[in-house]
Amino acid sequence: MSVKRCRSRCIAPYSPDEVNSVLSVIDRSSEIGNRDYAIILLALGTGLRGCDIACLRRDAIDWHGCSVSILQKKTGDFLQLPLGGEIMNAIADYILKFRPESAEPYVFLTTGSPPKPLSHCALYKRLKKYKLLAGVAPREQRGFHSLRRTFATGLSSSGVDISTISSLMGHRGIDEDRPYLSYDNKQMAFVAMGCADVPFSGKYYSDCNSVQMHTGGGEDVL
């Protein structure tokens, strides 16, 4: 009797240098560039899926509590995440200065007339454009969703425990974290132990106590 082997798919996150290169080529003085900069920062700083960012509503952001609350499209589960000061400033800058006048409840809109919410595919195409401009080498299957991997990998490299990472990712159990921590063997071993998930809670402030991604060397990615 032969044993069927499962294919292991290992998709690389973006490195700090790649992230910085992409952000540096975005024209933040334009409506599209300012919007895209806020979107990419939001993805890097929260790990939100592209589908949740595309349909993010304005009332989902708590400007005083420095957090964002959504119902995840993939799972239908509620998720509340802290927002760092840089992310909040980028989103506020877009809304106040560049967002088209519209009654649409969504944060990020197209520039056409009438303005409409962005699609998930649009986020992938925008990031692909900036990667080309920044000279980031293309890798198989590494698109917008890999910003989510970058978020998880950055937390893991900083020593954040797997249960907290799982909660921040909006996963129902830490077994779902395997694809996102495939570059950290120590954390992967922890996942294999099947430890119970631990709820994540706390207060955050955009000026100093917000959750930030770090590289293994301790430098801020964002």
Image (cartoon, grey):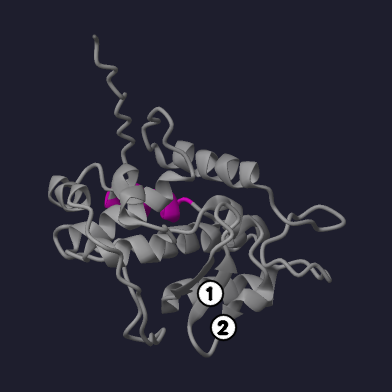
Front position in the image: 192 or 105: 192
Q: Is residue 178 left or right of residue 97?
A: left
Q: Is residue 202 left or right of residue 163?
A: right
Q: Position of residue 175 (x, y in %)?
A: 31, 49
Q: Is residue 21 visible?
A: no
Residue farthest toward the right in the current orientation of the protein: 114
Q: Position of residue 126 (x, y in %)?
A: 58, 45
Quadrant assignment, res 23: bottom left
Q: Secondary structure at mark 2?
A: strand
Which residue type does callout 1 highlight?
Val
First-in-chain label (1 vs 2) = 2
Residue farthest toward the top in the current orientation of the protein: 1
- Provide the residue designation for mark 1: 68
Q: Is residue 25 visible?
A: yes
Above/below status of 149 relative to 94: above
- Quadrant of the image containing the N terminus: top left
Query: Badge 1 local density, few (<14 within 10 Å), some, or many (20+)?
Result: many
Q: Position of residue 115 (x, y in %)?
A: 81, 58
- Provide the residue designation for mark 2: 62
Which residue type does callout 2 highlight?
Asp
**Magenta residue check for 20:** yes
Q: Which residues are magenta?
A: 16-25
Give the residue at x 60% y 52%. Answer: 51
Residue farthest toward the bottom in the current orientation of the protein: 64
Query: Badge 2 local density, few (<14 within 10 Å), some, or many (20+)?
Result: some
The reply to whether callout 1 and callout 2 are in contact (CB within 8 Å) is yes
Front position in the image: 144 or 194: 194
Q: Disc 1 and disc 2: Cα gap in Å? A: 6 Å
Q: Which mark is residue 165?
A: none
How many badges with numbers are in the image? 2
Quadrant assignment, res 63: bottom right
